[in-house]
Image (cartoon, helix red, strand yellow):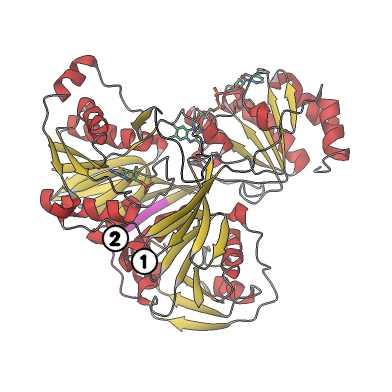
Amino acid sequence: MKVLVPVKRVVDFNVKVRVRPDGSGVDTANVKMSMNPFDEIAVEEAVRLKEKAIVTEIIAVSCGITACQETLRTALAMGADRAILVESTVELQPLAVAKLLKAIVDKEAPQLVILGKQAIDDDANQVGQMLAALLGWPQATFASKIDITEEGGQKRATVKREIDGGLETLAMNLPAIITTDLRLNEPRYATLPNIMKAKKKVLDIIKPDALGVDVTPRLATLKVVEPPRRKGGGKVADAKELVAKLRNEAKVI
Amino acid sequence: MTALVIAEHDHGALKSATLHTVAAAQKLGGDIHVLVAGHNAGGAAQAAASIAGVAKVLHADAAHLASQTAENLALLATSLAAPYYHFFLPATGFGKNAAPRIAALLDVAQVSDIIGVEAPDTFVRPIYAGNAFATVQSKDLKIVVTVRSTGFDAAPSTGGNAAIESVAAPADVAQVQVLGQELTKSDRPELTNARVVISGGRGLQNGENFKMLEALADKLNAAIGASRAAVDAGYVPNDYQVGQTGKIVAPDLYIAIGISGAIQHLAGMKDSKVIVAINKDAEAPIFQIADYGLVGDLFEIVPQLIAELG
Ligand SMILES: Cc1cc2nc3c(=O)[nH]c(=O)nc-3n(C[C@H](O)[C@H](O)[C@H](O)COP(=O)(O)OP(=O)(O)OC[C@H]3O[C@@H](n4cnc5c(N)ncnc54)[C@H](O)[C@@H]3O)c2cc1C
Ligand SMILES: Nc1ncnc2c1ncn2[C@@H]1O[C@H](COP(=O)(O)O)[C@@H](O)[C@H]1O
């Protein structure tokens, strides 16, 4: 079966972003960009399913500017078989991304789409669930373990997922949507030979128009500001002073 | 304009996040209806009717709503959608799972994790792990919102006397089977609710050492949290994780022990009223946001603290 893995190009998780002084957004010029960490986990999971011969083909998809090709090459170097860039310079919001991905799913007919649970730039945590709704497929969000089985030609996913009080186990027939949580796996690093090989893999480019999707933003960003800064840096000498300060100064105990 | 709040509950009672979500909806200035979808959830419906400021409770009761799957919940919510502009859910595991499914079925945008309401169509939300606050305005005819509890004081759970109206649930889509849950058992206050939170990081070295934090937590009636590193290393269960991709907390007192202060961790706790950090590395970034930093070995300091608290 085919699996589709959407991957987003985001500011690297180690970078502390700066808000532009004019309040129009955050500075992303000359900042290190990487694949969204949750999407690395999604690619890794797909590659492991292929190594177990459950998956036959992995297609990585990214929606965004030309530079997203780098993110797709990373996915190819990790083990994806081919890649699709849905190229657009418009700001793509989660609903638009979900619609683009639905159009790709309609063309490619994968049995499984594995996404990250959340992009660490917009922190939206929406696209996977939206895609599931648009397709009318079941969803297993925040997965920490995935098992795929087959009985009488029907493939089935059993997914352990992280919930606020602990863990929950779901079972569903494929096709389905799964979103990854951090503990699902430890993504591999792309090796140099695989990075070289990835350069030769197919990377198709399509435009939202060709997919018949209107990507006009639904939300206008009116302003972006720095959060209030916390005045920290106070020190105490020992446990005794700490307890005294918490009691008499901060009055929190 | 009436807002529909979709309640998080365990059938018998409401989760506290629902009260914070109602409080956020109250900022819109219109009427508030609360949807309680469950099985034998009369207790939760009653509790919703008692919240001050709630005008009506919609109660959907069906066996297939017992596990509150996003698939069935989204169908139910959209079947009731016509009179509503706003759909408010808590930004908890429950709300994050279901809300986008509702938004997509309605073909409207969702605003995640709001911490402020500027106007009925305009909200403030953190982005980039809380390193920026964005003010966004919806151009859609309806809007789905998830509410970060720490952004709004809880609505009073008593004082209301709303009518409870039964509503029919659409047929079970039966796409997902819930095989079971493994819930972390604890007698402590809930992490997202506690007045005091004590979190441990990689500096604790193992799960056994976390027991030391238990003794401290006993003294302060505190909840216990953790950094992702501590969770990853298996010292404590996943639902202890505080941070950008874990739980968001803002207690009166947050004590970070053996935690370096990565931006992803700070994102989950930096709105706490008072922050204490205990770390042997004087350069650890956690000290930059701590009101009271104590540089030293946690294995010496924590027992001293327990003794001081008497
Ligand atoms: C996509 C993504 C999402 C993430 N989400 C989260 C999240 O939600 N929450 C989160 O917490 N992290 C998250 N992280 C991980 C984060 O980047 C850090 O790796 C993590 O927070 C570090 O945990 P730590 O501070 O316990 O460990 P470390 O950074 O290893 O720090 C351990 C600290 O303990 C101190 N120490 C050691 N021994 C002692 C001692 N005996 N006495 C006193 N101090 C001692 C050390 O000086 C050090 O400062 C995420 C990462 C990614 C990539
Ligand atoms: N522009 C994009 N291109 C490809 N995949 C995306 C894009 N935006 C979001 N995704 C996928 O959707 C997941 C959740 O993103 P979000 O809902 O924006 O937090 C990500 O982890 C990706 O798997």
Residue B308: x %, y % from top left = 85, 30
- Return the residue found at the far top: A192
Which residue is drawn at the image coordinates 73% and 46% (left, top)?
Answer: B252
Can residue A55 be seen? no
Ligand 1's quadrant: top right
Magenta stretch in the rendered image: B170-180
Q: Pointer 2: what residue?
A: A133
Quadrant of the snapshot with the C terminus of chain B: top right
Q: Quadrant of residue B101?
A: bottom left
Taking the magenta stretch, the answer to whether it contains residue A17 is no
Mark 2 is on which residue type? Ala
Q: Name the subunit of mark 2.
A: A
Q: Which mark is residue B74?
A: 1
| Disc 2 to disc 1, C-alpha distance | 8 Å
Q: Residues within 10 Å of mark 1 (few under 14, many from 20)?
A: many
Residue A22: x %, y % from top left = 51, 43
Which residue is drawn at the image coordinates 42% and 57% (left, top)?
Answer: A220
- Return the residue found at the far front: A22
Q: Which mark is residue B97?
A: none
Pick the residue in front: A56 or B250.
B250
Pick the residue in front: B68 or B31.
B31
Mark 1 is on which residue type? Ala
Query: Is A90 situated left or right of B3 in this image?
Result: left
Pick the residue in front: B237 or A233.
A233
Which residue is drawn at the image coordinates 21% and 29% (left, top)?
Answer: A73
Whether residues under marks 2 and 1 lie with C-beta atoms below 8 angstroms apart, the answer is yes
Can residue A247 be seen? yes
Which residue is drawn at the image coordinates 85% and 27% (left, top)?
Answer: A241
Pick the residue in front: A230 or A223.
A223
Residue B122: x %, y % from top left = 50, 62
Q: Quadrant of residue B300?
A: top right
Query: Is A112 situated left or right of A36 in this image?
Result: left
